[in-house]
Amino acid sequence: MIAMAGCQSAGPDNNQGSGTCGGKIAIFGAFSGGNAGIVTPSRDGAKLAVEKFNAANPNCKVTMVEFDTEGDPAKATPVANQVAADQSFVAVIGGHFSGESRATMKTYEGGGLVMVSPSATATDLTTTGNKAFHRVVGNDDSQGPAISNYISKVWKSTKVFVTDDGSAYGAALANTVKSKLGTAVVASDKVQEKQADFAATIAKVKSSGADVVFHGGYVREAAPLLKQLRGAGFTGKFIGGDGLYDAEFAKAAGTTESEGAIITCPCIPSDKAKGGFNFASEFKAKFGTDPGPYAAEGYDSATVLLDGFKAGKKTRAEMLAWVDSYNKAGLTKTIKFDDKGEVDAANVVIWAYTVKAGQVVADQEIPK
Amino acid sequence: MNFDALFSQLGQHTIDGLSKGAIYALVALGYTLVYGVLRLINFAHSEVFMVGTFAVLGAWTVMGANSKDSLGMILVYLLVALAAAAIASAGVALAVERIAYRPLRKKNAPSLVFLITAIGVSTVLMETFGYVLDRGFSAFAPGTWNGFGRPFGRVIAGMPTVVAQKPLLDLGIFTITNTQLIVIVGAIGMMIALDVFINRTRLGRGVRAVAQDPDTAALMGVNKDRVIMLIFVLGGAMAGGAALLYGLKLGNTVFDVGFLIGIKAFTAAVLGGIGNLRGALLGGLLLGVIEVYGATLTQSNWEDVWAFAVLVVVLMFRPTGLLGESLGRARA
């Protein structure tokens, strides 16, 4: 694949007719459903990138088609079959979650497509030798240690309670945090997805004497857990991974209950986005909201592909080779994929966000 | 297994379990009432409860309820939410009866048809709340749905905290909080009222008569259709009460909130003896306690395994449940 990097030298050509430049890309993820809040900003970031590109390159029209999977691997699979079979699609942005990415990457690989994921972080996605999958974020190997660093270095806590929802994402993250914190973890519990009553978990937290609770999982369980913890008089701190980076988290948990909760994310705050233009304000002007989690990463994912169209790549094979050899600064970091499809871990930073008066705001870059 | 964690705080876990089970018990009444009279498992009952939780959310949001108001205002919040939830739930239950079940009954449809209709109605109601409230309003008419500030339904929605949880009574072996006490006392109070209604009033006698022998009851001048409507309304009102207590205790709702509670309440009804009102109470409370004990002994994601293991064992020795089937038929 690396040998095909020569294609790049074809160079940008804005003056080609619409028949020879441009094409169609597919984007899939949880655009509706309980976890949509952490996915739609990324889609909107990609949308912004495509529209800016089309405005700047009227002769090179790129269309992006959205496929809503609700983040469910079972719903992502038929989408993958459809996209892979439809030869008009040249590349794919996604998946947004690890589960749906794992379920579909073989199908996309079989179709010769390239996937650029803005937010799927499970570590094992890049270890299977899959040629299609690339991601512009760090993986859980960087987020897990960052969470434990925050707990041990910023909060200096030695009494941590770890819960997770048993999902591919939540359990893996909780395991990393547990192994990094070691003896600082005083007790742990596993809850179920869609659980509503956490009385038993709360009794365990209280009897363990923990002053920090970490939850690996999504808003659906974390918000009621935090609300009930606070209701039961827990005054310690609460921290979770990027699965909680959703404005709905604070709303569902309650403004007072969620105040000061920490959410980590391998995504950068939008006002830290580079790229020579004000990403945050352009995003807000277009969509009416501040860019949320992974908005800049979504923009970057799209840009990788758009640059390929601009360079005249028209087929799936050309686009795959283009992404493999891509090396350019994006909004969030320098984007260059290694042979597994990962960006350089040295460029990956994990940010801590905090909930303030019901809003998720940037707190600090977590020390490595 | 962590026996130490269980036995060192057995009293506390029991209280936690009872307050969890009280809500199951109230929802279980709806299954049991309908089954007792019609020999039908109304699977749409879980969605009757779900609608109730949204009514509570709506009532409190519209009133701007919060826990800092005076005791009198909080009482008003509770009563208005109870009325809203009971009316909404009873209304939905009645509508389900009229639209989905009555036409089938008139045509003497086999019981399997009722079963699949019940599941269908359940899905329709759930997805209506999940999609219409979420996508529908924002997709078809952007910006028009602002009743609650934002589209909701599929995303878990927080309710205002109306009663701030406070330890009320510390007896050494356990601490009971104000919300736990309200939940347990409220649920048992509602159930006693229902029990008295069924066993002591003229309308209740009609219900028992239809449960025992619909044809003879009709010959004695009992209007069967009216009795059936009555039990759906009663079951719905109890689900509305459960929705209020659920909102008070957990403070969240979502479009599929009824699914798990529905299954648990159905289990509770079977555990206690389906068709038996007191059995529903016993089954519900027992199920809640078993779940909390099990979750403490092992981990929270094992609570369902414990609950259903106990159910299977109980049914092996008492196939009709702990107290047996009896809404008229077995006992009267």
Image (cartoon, rainbow, N blue to C red):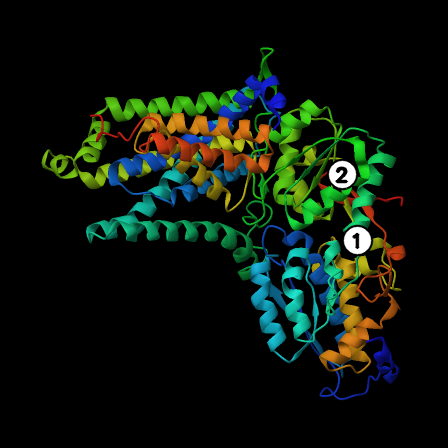
Residue A144, image x and y in percent? 78, 45
The residue that mark 2 highlights is: A178
Callouts 2 and 1 in the same chain:
yes
Which residue ends up furthest to the top in the rendered image?
B171
Q: Please provide percent x and percent y for residue A346.
A: 90, 55
Q: Position of residue A49 (x, y in %)?
A: 76, 68
Q: Amino acid at mark 2?
A: Lys
Q: Quadrant of residue A105?
A: bottom right
Q: Count of labels shown?
A: 2
The part of the image, by quadrant, that contains residue B30 is top left
- x, y percent for residue A307: 81, 74
* Residue under the point 29% across and 38% down: B35
Q: Circle 1 sits on which residue?
A: A267
Crowding at label 2, few (<14), some or many (≥20) Cα neighbours within 10 Å? many
**Position of residue B157 in the picture relative to residue A314 (left or right):** left
Quarter placement of the C terminus of chain A: top right
Residue B225 vs residue B44, the one in the foreground:
B44
Query: Is residue B165 something that shows in the picture?
Result: no
Q: Residue at x 61, y 69 (%)?
A: A80
